[in-house]
């Protein structure tokens, strides 16, 4: 009776071992390419986001095509244009405003213009005009092109919206800690967990100014929020894969993703929460906040909420993109990574998780401001 209750470990096939080894190699190569861009941040990271978003736009257009179904080239051109517009809209709008302010200010007219891309990036923003143009274009294509269906129109609108918002929130997560520290230094105040506004002393202000100009902050501490999000997503995926491979018995969602198991999902959630909390708390409780005045020792419960939500949203993102592929009966969105698919196949859950953080962090800010208003 006792023996029947023992947890049985699945036999790992040679194919599974080979797949695991291949995944590790590809992951290592991607880390070597991406990590330096994440560390350098600023325009280097923006250039990486631009390249990946354009490849993703191509994969969105290419994946649903078949020998019988080909999209008009104008759809490719429009998809590239809209991807750039929706990802970089918030930057281009502030860039134009900053440039005009610089040129119209006599005191600055003789100085070289430089735009700090974190300036004013308080929350992700999608242009409503761009989104409406996107809808109108694809609905018109349904009327003009007989091979372009209403199903295709909703596919393009939905995918361009989700992926562009995902890439913009990736930029947001990398730049937001710098924006926040700059705002604290500018206004000399920070919100506490009880909603009270604490003014920064001159000594604290001088210390923050030194930190802001320190290479450690620019290339290290300001990247912690982005790394924290990536860690939560990647550990969910790796934990689910390993747990499912060893202990998986019950299918999670066989219609959409036949290989995912309930055991793997639970394992991914546990691993992700444990590792992200350990990572974040070990930083914030030693004086290295993920976001100054928001995701820090004072507001530890915000970190707890995000760490709990991330593995669930990450899994949802993976299943969402798998559902799209099933709908068009394709295995992968692209082939740039050979047998490992395309860019979208690698960053699907990362994009959706980054959207979560891009929405919830401004919400936490509003909560603190609301409490501050009540306490006045």
Image (tube, rainbow, N blue to C red):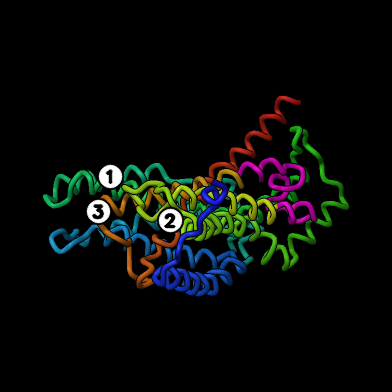
Residue 226, percent across and down? 59, 57
Label 3 or label 1, whichever comes before in sequence order: 1
User: Which residue does the numbered mark 3 point to in the structure image?
Assistant: 328
* Residue 312 in view here: yes
Compared with residue 78, is residue 112 higher up or lower down, i.e. above or below? below
Residue 212, percent across and down? 74, 60
Give the number of the mark in front: 1 or 2. Answer: 2
Q: Nearer the viewer, residue 214 or 55?
A: 55
Give the number of the mark in front: 3 or 1. Answer: 3
Instruction: Check residue 115 for magenta coloring.
Output: no
User: Which residue does the numbered mark 2 point to in the structure image?
Assistant: 348
**Disc marking residue 372:** none
Residue 189, percent across and down? 77, 43
Q: Residue at x 71, y 24 (%)?
A: 374
Q: Would you call the spot at circle 3 few (<14 residues within 10 Å), some (14-19), or many (20 or more)?
A: some
Q: Nearer the viewer, residue 33 or 365?
A: 33
**Disc marking residue 154:** 1
User: Which quadrant of the figure has residue 331?
Assistant: bottom left
Residue 180, percent across and down? 67, 50
Dots 3 and 1: beta carbons under 8 Å?
no
- What segment is highlighted magenta in the picture? 281-306
> Which structural element holds mark 2?
helix
Q: Nearer the viewer, residue 221 or 207?
A: 221
Q: Residue at x 58, y 58 (%)?
A: 231
For marks 1 and 2, give the CA distance: 18 Å
Q: Residue at x 42, y 48 (%)?
A: 250
For marks 3 and 1, give the CA distance: 13 Å
Q: Is residue 71 left or right of residue 279?
A: left
């Amino acid at each position: 009776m006792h023996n029947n209750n023992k947890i049985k470990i699945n036999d790992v096939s040679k194919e599974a071992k080979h797949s695991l080894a291949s995944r590790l190699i590809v992951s290592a190569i991607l880390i070597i390419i991406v990590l330096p861009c994440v560390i350098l941040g600023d325009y280097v990271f923006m250039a990486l986001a631009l390249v990946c978003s354009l490849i993703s736009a191509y994969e969105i257009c290419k994946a649903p095509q078949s020998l019988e179904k080909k999209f008009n080239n104008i759809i490719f051109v429009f998809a590239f244009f809209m991807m750039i517009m929706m990802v970089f809209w918030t930057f281009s709008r502030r860039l134009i405003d900053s440039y005009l302010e610089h040129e119209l200010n006599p005191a600055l007219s003789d100085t070289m213009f430089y735009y700090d891309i974190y300036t004013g990036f308080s929350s992700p923003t999608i242009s409503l005009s761009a989104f409406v143009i996107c809808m109108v274009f694809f609905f018109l294509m349904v009327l003009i092109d007989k091979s372009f269906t209403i199903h295709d129109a909703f596919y393009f609108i939905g995918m361009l919206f989700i992926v562009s918002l995902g890439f913009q929130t990736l930029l947001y997560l990398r730049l937001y800690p710098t924006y926040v520290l700059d705002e604290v230094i500018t206004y000399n105040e920070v919100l506490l967990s009880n909603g009270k506004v604490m003014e920064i002393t001159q000594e604290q202000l001088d210390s923050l100014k030194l930190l802001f100009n320190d290479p450690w902050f620019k290339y290290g501490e300001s990247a912690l929020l982005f790394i924290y999000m990536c860690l939560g997503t990647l550990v969910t995926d790796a934990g689910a894969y390993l747990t499912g491979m060893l202990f998986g018995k019950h299918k999670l969602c066989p219609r959409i993703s036949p290989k995912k198991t309930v055991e793997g999902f639970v394992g991914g959630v546990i691993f992700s929460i444990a590792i992200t909390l350990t990572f974040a708390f070990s930083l914030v409780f030693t004086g290295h906040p993920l976001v100054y005045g928001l995701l820090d020792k004072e507001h530890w419960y915000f970190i707890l909420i995000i760490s709990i939500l991330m593995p669930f949203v990450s899994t949802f993102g993976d299943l969402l993109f798998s559902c799209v592929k099933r709908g068009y009966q394709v295995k992968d969105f692209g082939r740039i990574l050979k047998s490992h698919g395309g860019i979208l196949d690698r960053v699907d859950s990362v994009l959706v998780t980054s959207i979560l953080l891009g929405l919830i962090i401004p919400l936490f800010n509003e909560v603190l401001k609301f409490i501050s208003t009540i306490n006045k």
